[in-house]
Amino acid sequence: MKVKFNRAALSEALALVTTVVPSRTTKPILQSLKISAQKDGVSISATDFEIGITSLIAQAQVDEAGDAVIPADRFAAIVRESIDEVLELESAEGTCHIRGADSVFTVYGHQPDQYPAIPGFEGEAHVEADLIKLQEAVEHCLFATAKENTRYALSGILWEAIGKKLTIVGTDGRRLAKYKLALHADADKKLESEKIIVPAKTMALLDRVSGTDKDKVSVRFVDNKIILACGNTVISSNLVEGNFPKYEDIIPTDYKNKLQLNTAATLSAVRRAALLTNEDSKGIKLALDKKSAVFTCRAPEMGDSEIAMEVDYKGEAIEIGFNPQFLIDVLKVIREDTFELHLGQSDRPGLIKSGSNYVYIVMPVSLT
């Protein structure tokens, strides 16, 4: 194999693909990248057996077709530190030579036929959506997924595709985020009865794919895998097994207390009120009356904070405690200038709405 790369285009592809490479593994070949050069282009692939990714590099000249498997960290470091506009990669029998204007690197890799196969995108899409809109939906739900593995089904994002709507949901048992987005066309009918759980890591990888308002994502579900294609990138991943909670039962529908708040001002108030939280006092209290919303925190042996906001509130006076980080997380992703806060009793979850497509539920905390 012999290929000349535009270094900037190669570096951009490596920044995405290398995120899949495992830092630790019992299979050393997984810490390498597979490079395939054909007449129609050059692709770079990585996998950790759970997730696979292939990126096509358009700005490459193929002088000799072939495959190479090269250690990811070494190759990425060479490309990153290079000052050349063009880099040449030549490979034969597991040895790779990388040449610049004044440099030559020889790197020992693996035999290409030993590298695991990575699924490509073949066939009709089951779901099609705008890339930017799907990424926005992911950003609104990803932070709410469980970080620990004790509840495996909660470590992913639920997909429900019905007609021209896709609903995605993330929860860790203490909060829940739900986002609806429009699809390009009706989803495959077979998906209507399916509860598909996509790993959070896969969704985070999709969120890193660069694109424009004109780019779309095509999605297939095959053999308990999800395969996503967008432009020059194909991502494949195992789905999460398990039962996702019946999230509709968790979303309150009977709340009468609600108000509209400025997103940026509320985010600032919550962050400032949380400055004095500690291990003994991790919560902040929200006290609402007709004209004010007051965020307070009291930490033993440290002090207390009080941040007041003027509001127009017509509901009942209420005091409720929240984990401030759970509020900060959601307020950071809301893109509208204002949002709605709905409340029941102090022992019931708070409900945040942004636009007509986003709902966020957060459980209260006891401050006694």
Image: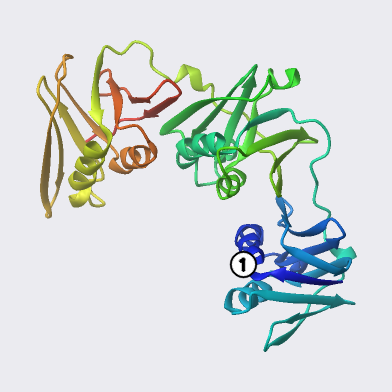
Residue 305, x across and y down, in percent: 12, 45
Q: Quadrant of the C terminus?
A: top left
The structure residue drawn at horizontal position 47% and vertical position 17%, both measured from the top left corner, is 249
Q: Does residue 368 appear anywhere in the picture?
A: no
Residue 88 drawn above or below residue 135: below
Regarding residue 170, the answer to whether it shows in the image is yes
Please give left or right for residue 298 compared with residue 320 in the image.
left
Say which quadrant the N terminus sits in.
bottom right
Residue at image mark 1: 8
Q: Is residue 252 left or right of residue 195?
A: left
Q: Is disc 1 placed on a helix, strand or loop?
A: helix
Is 52 above or below relative to 74?
above
On screen, 211 above or below 153? below
Q: Quadrant of residue 363?
A: top left
Name the residue nearer the viewer: 283 or 354: 354
**Looking at the rendering, which quadrant does residue 206 occupy?**
top right
